[in-house]
Amino acid sequence: MTENTEKRGFQTEVKQLLNLLANSLYSNKEVFLRELISNASDAIDKLRFAAVQDQSVYGDDSNLHIRLSADKEKKTLTISDNGIGMTRDQICEHLGTIAKSGTADFFKNLSGDQAKDSQLIGQFGVGFYSAFIVADKVTVVSRAAGVAPDQAVCWESDGTGEYTVSTVTKADRGTDVILSLKEDDKEYLEDWTLRNAVTKYSDHISVPVEMLETVKPEKKDDDKEEDKSEDNAEEKAEDKKEETAEYTEWKQINEAKALWTRSAKDITDDEYKEFYKHISHDWDDPLTWAHNHVEGAQEYTSLLYVPKHAPWDLFNREQKHGLKLYVQRVFIMDDAEQFMPGYLRFVKGVLDSNDLPLNVSREILQDSKLTSKLKSGCTKKALQMIGKMAKDENQDNYKTFWKEYGSVMKEGLVEDYDNREEIFDLMRYASTHNDNSEQNVSLQDYISRMPEKQKNIYFLTASTYAAAASSPYLETFKKKGIEVLLMTERVDEWVMNQVTEYKEKKFVSVTASDLDLGDLEDKEEKEKQENQTKENEDFLKKVKEALGEQVTDVKVTNRLTDTPSCVIGQGNQMMTAQMRRILEASGQTLPDEKYTLEINLDHDLVKHLAAETDENRFKDWAQLILDEAILADQGALKEPARYVKLVNSLLLNK
């Protein structure tokens, strides 16, 4: 009996997703079963957690299980669980919307190519909606724990844009997902197909997965002398009929032992990969994993994974992340972020502690000393896992890792002082040693190539690789054969203002106002610079007066060879245009940048300026040289129209 029925439309993103699922081709359709069994397992885990506080949630049904049943006549496959169940509001929230940040980016990246889009679907993790790969109608009947039988809810959709939801009666707690299979997918009504899929994808989960099995009683041996009487013959015939009668019963078809509790030597790579997909709802294999059991003052087990692809919301630090927390094999919570630092928010996995109390809450975890110790242990294990990948002879996996997660790993250089050295070892940068933008230079590589006299690690931050590689600040370094790290990500500027050295070698920006190359300095060039400064005092003063408050000083430089000028700020590194834009976008009001203009007296443009006798044109040429320096450094000017007018005027000799 159904009542209170209403029809609703899917969220726009769900419509797009369902349309994509219906029209994409899959070589492994059976993953839908893994997704639905994983959802059922999560529902049972949540019920177990609720029972920690209140055993009455079990009612008279504490034998927790997931059951698969196929009806060949109706062409339906049902996945049932007796877990926590869902209310009407919950079912509409979970099955009518995709409550996941990054959905807009996800759909923006869809190309229309079915094969490529299928991979994107796997990265996004569609969970329940994968049912529509094999079903042309999906019915969900659910009764939440503690809710009356006549307050269960039925959700139904053919996946074309709308769904209905109504109140129904359901005798037992939990959720039934009923799939009306497409004509081409009837193989999922066969016992052997379902058993193979469960063994392949869900053998490792801790919840029993059951199927109905036909049982044939064993034949009884009866070596007693037969009674020849007619009455007894009828009785024996009846007994014989009972002995040979077939019946069905629910049989467990998976191992149902939590994978992380088993010995690592007994677990295959395929089992590790399938368990990762179970806990993450990812369709790709992980890049790497680490299984660790610790005994002693603390006893805990961790199983950590690095996904092959970064989640869409990787840079949203407020988005939920963290490990699945268990205490003595009892599920406690998803996304326990207290055990993994922010820069490792992409790490997935399980933490099972024997020391935390079963009734632990997020508030208790926040202030617990034990939590701090567990976080430290998990962090070190995660860094070791990543470090092992970095040292592997085959660097393909680490290249993938750095492309996906390099930016967030850099956050750790500031956030995690205790592990800074280990994090530094994982860093990769582009550099002038290579003629491409690939970030594959480690700090160890850089140091190994340093000339004997070089004491510092030189770097340049810029908005793009092209801007960095063509920067005039590199000219003297290229001339001397000194390698410079090229840093082009937004996070680099923040990090390099916070860290000072690596293995007792200081980081020095090539744009530093007090740049000192030490023993690498050419004495003749230094003397030449000093002499030029003395000989051109009046000229330098005249340029400074022409530019007015735009500059704090005008100096002769020896850092340029092919460029007429460059600008530098105060201290070790001036605030770049990119950093200014970031700060201004956050609502901060910044004063106008004051520059020191350094000019190359050997450049023809500067010589032209020095020879100019017309005062107005002298000011124009000085302004042009300053604007060019700012443009080369920052890629933009505050008044581009004024600059264009100035260039045109000088070209036309007006």
Image (cartoon, rainbow, N blue to C red):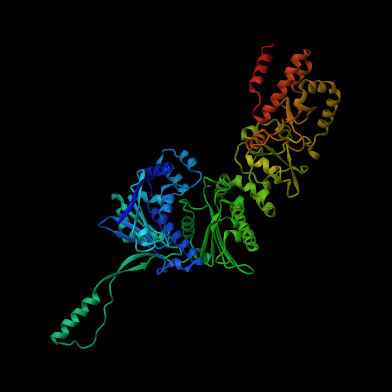
Residue 344, percent across and down? 59, 52
Foreground pick, 575 / 86: 86
Q: Which residue is situated farthest in the front direction here?
A: 4
Foreground pick, 341 / 188: 341
Tell me if residue 613 comes above or below residue 104 in the rendering. above
Residue 604, percent across and down? 74, 20
Tell me if residue 541 comes above or below residue 103 in the rendering. above
User: On the picture, is 368 further left or further right than 617?
Assistant: left
Tell me if residue 117 comes above or below residue 549 in the rendering. below
User: On the picture, is 265 further left or further right than 190?
Assistant: right
Foreground pick, 106 / 287: 106
Tell me how many marks there are.
Answer: 0
At 58% from the left and 59% from the top, the residue drawn is 362
State the image quarter where residue 367 is shown.
bottom right
User: On the picture, is 588 further left or further right than 164?
Assistant: right
Residue 339, percent across and down? 60, 58
Q: Which residue is situated farthest in the left direction here?
A: 230
Foreground pick, 62 / 497: 62
User: On the picture, is 511 further left or further right than 92?
Assistant: right
Residue 590, percent across and down? 70, 34
State the image quarter where residue 465 is shown.
top right
**Residue 50 appearing in the image:** yes
**Residue 424 appearing in the image:** no
Q: Which quadrant of the figure contains the C terminus?
A: top right
